[in-house]
Image (cartoon, rainbow, N blue to C red):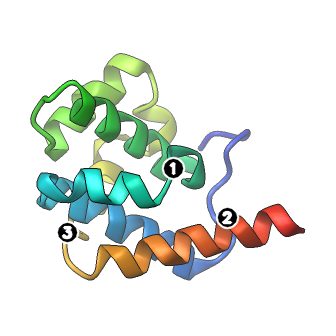
Amino acid sequence: MDDNNPEPRYPELGMAMDTVLGVAMEHPDRAAEIFARVRIADFHGSHRHIAEALHKLRLDKEPIEALSIIDEMNRRGTLSRSGGPAEVLRVAGFGFGEPMYACDIIACSCCRAMSM
């Protein structure tokens, strides 16, 4: 993983990031709504690399799916640092749940970290 961008300390934060990104992959039409609530900088570790690739594909109006995210991460050189294709596919499996609640968890965590 990226030493400058460690994984989250709290398990619920990791699950919230899994949910947000998984839903964005499963339901690309919700990606704009999600990225309006959380910033790329709010994600940590492998989640940030996945979010960056997903967001770029969204802005470029490319298909948002696990394989295209893997290709984009490979092009950027972040795939191997993020756990490889298995990590992207693991996160893609979280395409359920309520992403807005998960966005709130991520946003609150970032506010908490900024106040420390």
- At label 1, which amino acid type do we have? Arg
Categorize mark 2 by other alpha carbons within 10 Å: few (<14), some (14-19), many (20+). Answer: some
Instruction: Depth check: give the residue in front, 13 or 110.
Output: 110
**Which residue is found at the position 58% from the left and 54% from the top?**
42
| Label annotation for residue 15 | none
For residue 60, above or below residue 100: above
For residue 73, above or below residue 1: above
Instruction: Depth check: give the residue in front, 36 or 46.
Output: 36
* Alpha carbons under labels 3 and 1: distance apart: 19 Å
Q: Nearer the viewer, mark 3 or mark 1?
A: 1
| Label annotation for residue 39 | 1
Of helix, strand and loop, which one carries label 1? loop
Q: Earlier in the sequence, mark 2 or mark 1?
A: 1
**Which residue is found at the position 30% from the left and 49% from the top?**
88
Of helix, strand and loop, which one carries label 3? loop
For residue 33, above or below residue 85: below
Instruction: Depth check: give the residue in front, 53 or 111.
Output: 111
Q: Are marks 2 and 1 in contact (CB under 8 Å)?
A: yes
| Label annotation for residue 95 | 3
